[in-house]
Image: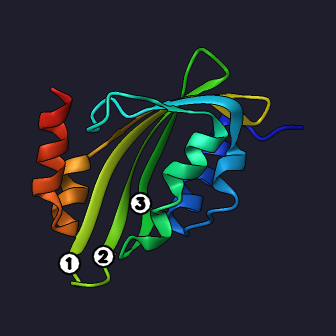
Amino acid sequence: MPDSPTEVFHRLVQGVANVRMNELPRLYAEDALVSHPFGPSKEPIKGRDGLRAHFASLPDLPIEMEVKDVVVHKTADPEVVIAEFAYEGRVTTTGRPLRIPNVFVLRVRDGEIVESRDYAHHVAFAEALGRLPELIAEYQARA
């Protein structure tokens, strides 16, 4: 029996926090669509290959983090869960604390994510990494 949407969500966020690069793309369907509505890019990430490229920079980030404050809301649609949580940790190069609140809306079919809308606090992440000017420039370019 395939994993439930809640189980897939937990595998996803733990995989990100623990930098499990080989596992993350396999959580998604081949034709998955992932959008970051509050992110700097207007374009969604398409398919497993796009997600593989998206996750490729994760090991290079100077961060250590854990998943905290998880609340998963089941919906009337058995394929969809809404999850609130935060990535919490520190920037390893500076020791600066890191807390990134998130809300994910996941559609999981047959144990694979087919669609996800990821509402992350991109400003908090950029600020912790000292990359706020770059993020602002990306948002301005998007406008």
Rendering coords of residue 43 (x, y %): 39, 28
Is residue 106 shown to the viewer in this render? no
Circle 3: element type: strand
**Amino acid at the residue labelled 3:** Lys
Seen at 21% across and 58% down, the residue is 126
Say whether residue 41 is left or right of residue 109.
left
Residue at the spot of label 3? 68
Which numbered dot is residue 96?
A: 1
User: In this rendering, would 70 be left or right of 127?
Assistant: right
**Mark 2 and mark 1: Cα distance apart in space:** 5 Å
Left-right relation of 11 to 83: right
Specify whether residue 30 is in view. yes
Marks 3 and 2, the one that precedes in the sequence: 3
- For disc 3, the neighbor class at 10 Å (few under 14, some 14 to 19, many from 20) is some
Task: Using the image, determine if residue 23 lies above or below residue 75.
Answer: below
Asked if residue 82 is positioned above or below residue 16 in the image, the reply reads above
The mark that comes first in sequence, 1 or 3, is: 3
Q: Residue at x 66, y 49 (%)?
A: 25
Q: Residue at x 22, y 68 (%)?
A: 129
Observer-nearest of 82 and 100: 100
Q: Which mark is residue 90?
A: 2
Q: Secondary structure at mark 1?
A: loop
| Residue 72 image point, x, y percent | 51, 39
Q: How is the image coloured?
A: rainbow
Quadrant that contains the C terminus: top left
Q: Amino acid at mark 2?
A: Arg
Earlier sequence position, callout 2 versus callout 1: 2
